[in-house]
Image (spheres, helix red, strand yellow):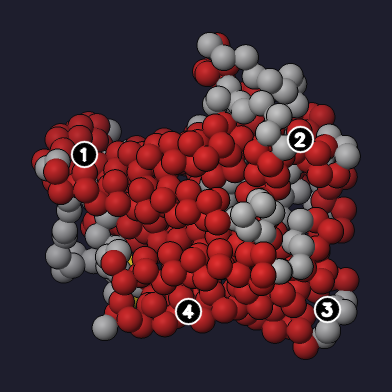
């Protein structure tokens, strides 16, 4: 029954995405890469996309038993569904996006089912026992003050970042964030270690501490988490920290129920997030007050529309012309030791931004399918990154247990959100995704034992 309910919800979600494209993205932002939908050109592609989207909730587990389950559902709702519907409606490739949709879907289903297949072939429970129980717990037992040390390290990081960037700190409004970002970029470009410290402090430690507060109501951790968010915003003026805080609240108090993650509620949350701003802009006839318009554009275009947009633009640049070089994964630092990066000191986003807007200042950063797939190796790259993601998600499963999945999923949701706008490898390194797992394992083993009456299912 749950699968049919979920499928019905996805049908509504898909209809809303299509409506957002027709009535908002194309009329307001068509010049940026949302052309008018041509049914004769790509109608068949859209139908195929909807079939791929509707099949998934009928065959994939609704219950979150492993960490990879929640990651896959997040990608499905936030990245995959929006991407292939928008790609279909863009119709950028000459075939109306048909092959692009097929390859994206194959990549997604691959990353979804590789952890499922491997978890059945390999005794994950025994591996978890060996890695987590025998190693992490021994460390915790030898050092009862581990959480105190983690908190101390975080405070030292905050002080270091504050002192190093004190001359550029500024709380900007949404109207002037780009000026602050330019200042921040000039200040930290030559300091790789500072860039890592700033990213980890917010994306890892701040979200971790806020999660502790949301589950255990320890106010000191809320203060620390908000302090990290505020410092990050005052340096790089990234609007996502505001939306992230509300996303974490929504997941904690609406999606997590009785110690379990309710995917149906998560899907309803996605529908609410996209339908409310869409209803407002339709009511106002796309003539919203400027302050409201910024928020609406951040949600409808920047959050829900950007994945499909960048996939189409990257395809247009790297594959449609047939003359632009692939990176062959040389956009990753270690790979550059063996393969020359073809674009000099410019990032992939800057190269594509120059192609689209005529200036390198426009950084068209994109998610893993565009960056690690199309830009790296075209259609083949899309399949390769699906395979790599599936293996990564399975490895995550080895280091996590179901008992604290809600805590971990909430703490690391920022990393899942991050891969919609960057390389999966950047999310692992700069975003510090594995550090989330380490911290949650330490905190859970040290003190937090949630839902003691819940039956633990691993493997």
Q: Is residue 140 visible?
A: yes
- Residue 119 is left or right of residue 423, and the answer is left
Q: Tag on residue 350?
A: 2
Q: Given contact means CB atoms under 8 Å apart, are the residues at marks 1 and 2 in contact?
A: no
Q: Quick one: label 3, few (<14), some, or many (20+) residues within 10 Å?
A: some
Q: Which residue is the extreme one toward the top?
A: 338
Locate residue 435, reporting x and y percent: 42, 38
| Quarter of the picture holding the N terminus | bottom left
Return the mark for residue 132.
1
Residue extending farthest to the bottom is 283
Name the N-terminal-most of marks 1 and 2: 1
**Apparent side of residue 81 relative to residue 134 in the rendered image (left or right):** right
Q: Which mark is residue 176?
A: none
Residue in the image at 87% along x and 37% along y: 359
Judge by depth and name the residue closer to the eye, 208 or 382: 382
Work out whether 63 lies above or below 397.
Answer: below
**Can see residue 206?**
no
- C-alpha gap between disc 1 and disc 4: 40 Å
Numbered disc 2: secondary structure: helix
> According to the image, label 3 marks what residue?
286
Q: Secondary structure at mark 4?
A: helix
Q: Residue 55: which quarter of the image?
A: bottom left
Whole-Å distance between the Cαs marked 2 and 3? Answer: 30 Å
SS for tag 3? loop
Q: Residue drawn at (82%, 37%), measured in percent from left and top? A: 354
Between the C-alphas of marks 1 and 3, the distance is 53 Å
Q: Which percent across, then down, holds residue 45?
A: 56, 64
117 or 318: nearer the eye?
Answer: 318
């Amino acid at each position: 029954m749950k699968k049919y309910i979920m499928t019905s919800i996805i049908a509504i979600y898909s209809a809303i995405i299509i409506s957002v494209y027709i009535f908002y993205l194309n009329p307001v932002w068509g010049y940026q890469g949302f052309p008018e939908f041509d049914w004769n050109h790509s109608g068949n592609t859209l139908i195929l996309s909807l079939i791929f989207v509707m099949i998934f909730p009928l065959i994939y587990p609704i219950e979150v038993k492993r960490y990879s389950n929640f990651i896959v559902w997040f990608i499905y709702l936030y990245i995959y569904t929006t991407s292939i519907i928008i790609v279909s409606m863009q119709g950028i490739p000459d075939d109306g996006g048909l092959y692009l949709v097929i390859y994206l879907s194959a990549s997604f289903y691959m990353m979804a089912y590789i952890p499922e297949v491997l978890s059945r072939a390999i005794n994950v429970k025994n591996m978890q026992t060996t890695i987590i129980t025998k190693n992490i717990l021994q460390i915790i037992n030898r050092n009862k003050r581990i959480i105190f040390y983690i908190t101390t390290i975080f405070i030292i990081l905050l002080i270091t970042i504050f002192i190093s960037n004190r001359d550029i700190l500024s709380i900007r409004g949404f109207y002037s964030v780009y000026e602050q970002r330019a200042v921040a970029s000039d200040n930290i470009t030559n300091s790789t270690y500072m860039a890592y410290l700033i990213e980890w402090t917010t994306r890892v430690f701040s979200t971790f501490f806020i999660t502790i507060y949301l589950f255990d109501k320890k106010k000191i951790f809320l203060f620390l988490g908000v302090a990290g968010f505020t410092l990050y915003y005052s340096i790089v003026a990234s609007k996502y920290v505001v939306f992230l805080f509300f996303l974490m609240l929504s997941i904690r108090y609406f999606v997590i129920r009785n110690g379990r993650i309710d995917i149906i509620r998560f899907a309803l949350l996605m529908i609410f997030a996209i339908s409310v701003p869409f209803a407002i802009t339709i009511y106002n006839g796309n003539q919203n007050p400027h302050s409201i318009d910024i928020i609406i554009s951040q949600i409808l275009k920047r959050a829900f529309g950007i994945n499909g947009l960048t996939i189409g633009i990257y395809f247009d640049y790297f594959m449609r012309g047939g003359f632009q070089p692939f990176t062959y994964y040389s956009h990753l630092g270690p790979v550059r030791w063996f393969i020359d990066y073809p674009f000099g000191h410019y990032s992939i986003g800057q190269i594509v931004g120059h192609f689209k807007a005529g200036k390198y200042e426009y950084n068209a950063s994109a998610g893993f399918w565009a960056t690690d797939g199309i830009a790296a190796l075209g259609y083949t790259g899309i399949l390769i990154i699906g395979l790599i993601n599936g293996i990564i998600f399975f490895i995550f499963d080895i280091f996590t247990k179901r008992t604290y999945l809600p805590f971990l999923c909430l703490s690391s949701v920022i990393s899942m959100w991050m891969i919609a706008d960057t390389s999966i490898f950047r999310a692992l390194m700069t975003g510090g995704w594995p550090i989330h797992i380490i911290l949650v394992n330490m905190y859970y083993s040290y003190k937090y034992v949630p839902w003691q009456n819940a039956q633990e299912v691993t493997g």
